Amino acid sequence: MWQEQNNKLYQKFEFKNFSEAFAFMTRVALEAEKMDHHPMWTNVWNTVEVWLSTHDAGDVVTDKDRQLAKKIDAIMK
């Protein structure tokens, strides 16, 4: 579930292994590129953490972030 903290949407995702985590990141990257809206994220082994905010709007949460969050949720289904 996405949480809004420090003017960012945040969620942590856990997978069975690194390959699944990396595959998830690849799918998210393709959607983010289509939107020209790129997440801040980290990946350590099977864990991906994602922070979404809109830099052009002063690093706050906007509709673009919510739209990308929905696309990420759809990827997880």
Image (cartoon, rainbow, N blue to C red):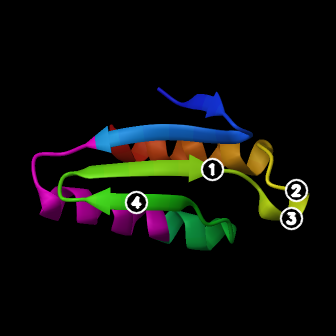
Name the residue at the front extreme.
6
The residue under the point 67% across, 65% down is 37
In front: mark 2 or mark 3?
2
Name the magenta segment's main secondary structure.
Answer: helix
Q: What is the spatial separation of the Cα atoms under label 2 and label 3, in whole angstroms?
A: 6 Å
The residue under the point 62% across, 39% down is 9
Q: Position of residue 2 (x, y in %)?
A: 53, 31
For residue 56, above or below residue 57:
below
For residue 22, above or below residue 20:
below
Q: What is the spatial separation of the Cα atoms under label 4 and label 2, in whole angstroms?
A: 22 Å
Residue annotated with mark 2: 58
SS label for mark 4: strand
Q: Label 1: how many residues lie within 10 Å, few (<14), some (14-19) or many (20+)?
A: many
> Which three-letter amino acid code belongs to the residue tagged 3?
Asp
Residue annotated with mark 4: 42
Disc 4 + disc 1, Cβ < 8 Å:
no
Assign the C terminus to one quadrant of the image: top left
> Which three-letter amino acid code belongs to the residue tagged 1?
Leu
Residue 64 within the magenta-colored segment of the rendering: no
Residues in magenta? 14-29
Q: What is the spatial separation of the Cα atoms under label 1 and label 2, in whole angstroms?
A: 12 Å
SS label for mark 3: helix
Q: How many marks?
A: 4
Give left or right: position of 69 versus 54: left
Residue annotated with mark 3: 56
Disc 2 + disc 3, Cβ < 8 Å:
yes
Residue annotated with mark 1: 52
Q: What is the spatial separation of the Cα atoms under label 4 and label 1, in whole angstroms?
A: 12 Å
Q: Position of residue 5 (x, y in %)?
A: 65, 32
